[in-house]
Structures are given as structure tokens and as C-alpha cells.
Amino acid sequence: MLSENTRSQTSLSGIQVSGKRLGVLIGGSGLIGGTLAYYFKTRTAGNIDIRAPSSKKLSIRNVDDIKAYLTQVQPDFVINTAIAAIDSDAHLAFEVNYLGSVNLARACCALGIPYIHISSAVTLPNGENLVEDDHLPLAPGLTHYAKSKLMAERTLRYMRQNQGLDFTAVRLAVVYGEHDHKIQGFHRLLFSIADESMPFMITRKGVRHSYTNANKIPYFVHHVLDHREEFSGETYHFVDKDPVELADLILTIRSYLEQKRPRELYVPYPVIRSGKFFLQWLAGVLNWFGISVCLPPELMFLENFYKSQTLSCEKLHKSSFIDPFPDETVYTALPRLVVYYLTRWGHLNLITTFNDEFIGDFELEEDFVNSPGELLNSIHTDSVSPFPELRREDKN
């Protein structure tokens, strides 16, 4: 049996650890964190145990929480997927995206364990074939989200050089995948088309972006943890091999859903920007009358719909990592994404157009809606007896 110190040293050497490892996952309720938690609990149960504490148990905004929890658990690695909402104010963005990440790194450095930091392409400029060394200049005009994520990346590199921090930063682009409980990013685009709330093309021809498959991320993180010598101190772009033209993706989704909108009429950015300013003004006016209006946070990235940003994945392909699903792209994933999200949104009454097709018939719906008393009595008569297979036998 390996001791805790021996396990950590073996992990740092880049050799696969023979003993069982314990990891802490921050942000386990989000799309990325939830996908990682599911992977480790279903595929690595014999080798890696994962703890995903809620923010009530471990708030990364509280340095004492970080110290107390990691001291108690003594993990072999930490993965941080937590982010503040992209439209958060400066205070929250700084404390969660930057200070929380740095304090986790400080704790990992003290414990001598790897720290896996999930970052974002928001730290990069627009452009084609951007590499890992590219980054935006740190300037006051950046959004709070971009500024805090960029600062976190820079501090992790500084700690690597000056404190010997064992970290790996994983930059993601436009993420797609199931089980995202928020309508954001790619799923906001899918929702807008399914809801027919995008009448025209809010982009221009030729604009391309990189996409990240959420289901592949756990395989890479697992590989990175098992090969620290190769991946320690490095940043990687984790994106699909081929960038996607936004206009083509929108039209493909429209065709798949058999919708008439958006019409293939490309609205210039100045017109869209004017509409954005009007909506923000209108929301402010309504707030005067006590009507709270929340505009989609993606509006802050509206300009990106008109500018390309593609990330080079050459460094990733030259590494020892092997893509578990090399042929899967956002296009091949569309059928299952559409079924999953339209079913979910239908249950939540966010979209009613596709209810019959994707949700299916609810055999008790008529009784539940029109005769709830009779339904309740029927259930009391037939379906409330204790499960016999769960009864405890009388020990006497």
C-alpha cells in the first residue's frame, strides 16, 4: 500500500499511479464539472476517487474554506472548473475567477500536488490559428470575465516560475454537450433557433470559430493527471480539429429542426449593435417601473458573431493524448443534442413547438390535469405500499 506522500511523488513523476488516488473537483455542478464528475465516478472508480464539494462546503471565495477542506481531505490533485457568471460584476468575477483560482493553486503548491485549471478562449484575441502563447493584452477595457481569466492564467505561469507550481491550463472554445442546466453559449444559439427568436442571420459569411466537445474533456484531464512530466507547466487548446463556420452551423440546425427561421439574410453588425443598445436602454426604463428584465449575458460577446476566432490544436495533437472520439464534431453531435435539449426545454415549458415529438405522451396527463382527486385516490389504493424488497428482516 502506498503512503500519501509516495502516491503524490509517483503522480508527479509522470508514471501511472498504482494506488488509488483522491481528487477534489471544484465546480462540479456546471457542464464541464458535471461531465468530469460523471466520468471519474463511472469509469475510474477503482483507481480514482473524486470529491466534488458544494459551494456551501467549500467556497473558493473564502481562503479559510480552501485551507480547511484540502487539509482535511489531503487530495492527490485538484481540478478547478468553477467560474462566475459571465456577466458578473467586477467583485464576483475577481473573487471567483481570479482570486479563488490563485488560492487553490497556492494550496496545491503547498501540498505538492497537481492543479488542473480550466480556462477559456476569452483570454485570446480574435484571429485564425491562434497558438497557446497568444493572449490578449491585460487592459481596463476587457470584460470582467476576460480580465479575471487572463489574470488567472498569468499568475499560474508566474507561480510555476517562482514557486514550482505543478499546473496544467486547459483552454476551451465554444463548448457543446449534454446536461448543461443553463441556456448559455452554444446552447443559447440552439435555443434561439428552436424558439424561432432569431429572425435573421446575426453573423456574416466566412466567420469561423473553434468548438470544444465536453464529453472528451475528462479523457484529456485523466491523461494529463497520469502523465505529469509531459503536461506539467503547460497550456493546451482543447478544441475539435476543424473550426466551424457559424453561418453554416446555424443553417444546419435550422434545417435539422425544419424551421423557416432564421432567414438567410445577413444583418450587418452596426445594425445589430444598435439593437443591442436599444434593448439595454429599454431594460433600464422597465426597471424604473419595478419590472426586472434580464438580457442574455451573451450579448456582451455579440461582436464575436462577426469576427473569427480559431484555435490551433497542433500542440495537443503532438502530445501523447489520443482523441477517444476523433470523428465526433458539433455536427455529428447535433442529433443527440437536439433531442436532449428540446426534451428538457419542453418539460420546463420554455419551448412548446416540439413537445409532442420529443417529450412523448404522458399517459396520466389527462387525469393529473382534469381529475387530480381521482388520481390521488387511485394511487393511495394501489401504489403506496412499502417496497417489499427493501424491507429489513426481523433479526429476532
Image (cartoon, rainbow, N blue to C red):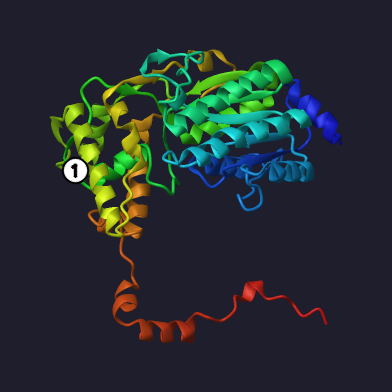
Residue 2: x percent and y percent?
A: 85, 34
- How many numbered badges does the structure rendering display? 1
Q: Residue 291's image quarter? A: bottom left
Q: Is residue 362 left or right of residue 88?
A: left
Identify the image quadrant of the N terminus: top right
Residue lying at 65% horizontally and 24% vertically, measured from the top left: 167
Compare residues 338 and 275 and report the one nearer the observer.
Answer: 275
Image position, residue 275 (x, y; %)? 20, 38
* Side (left or right) of 349 relative to 14: left
Residue 25 shows in this picture: yes
Is residue 92 shown above or below 163?
Answer: below
Name the foreground residue: 40 vs 289: 289
Q: Is 99 placed left or right of 360 in the picture?
A: right
Q: Which residue is depicted at the point 66% across and 30% down?
A: 115
Res 318 → quadrant:
top right
SS for callout 1: loop
Q: Name the residue beneath numbered marker 1.
A: 258
- At 42% across and 20% down in the image, what residue appears? 241
- Is 313 placed above or below 55 here? above
Relative image position of residue 252 (x, y in whole percent) = 24, 33
Q: Nearer the viewer, residue 109 or 10?
A: 109
Residue 110: image location, x then y, percent: 77, 30
- Residue drawn 26% across and 37% down? 253
Q: Which picture quadrant has residue 379?
A: bottom left
Which amino acid, mark 1? Answer: Glu
Disc 1 crowd rating (10 Å Cα; few below 14, some 14-19, many 20+) is few
Q: Note whether residue 232 is visible.
A: no
Looking at the rendered image, the quarter that the C terminus falls into is: bottom right
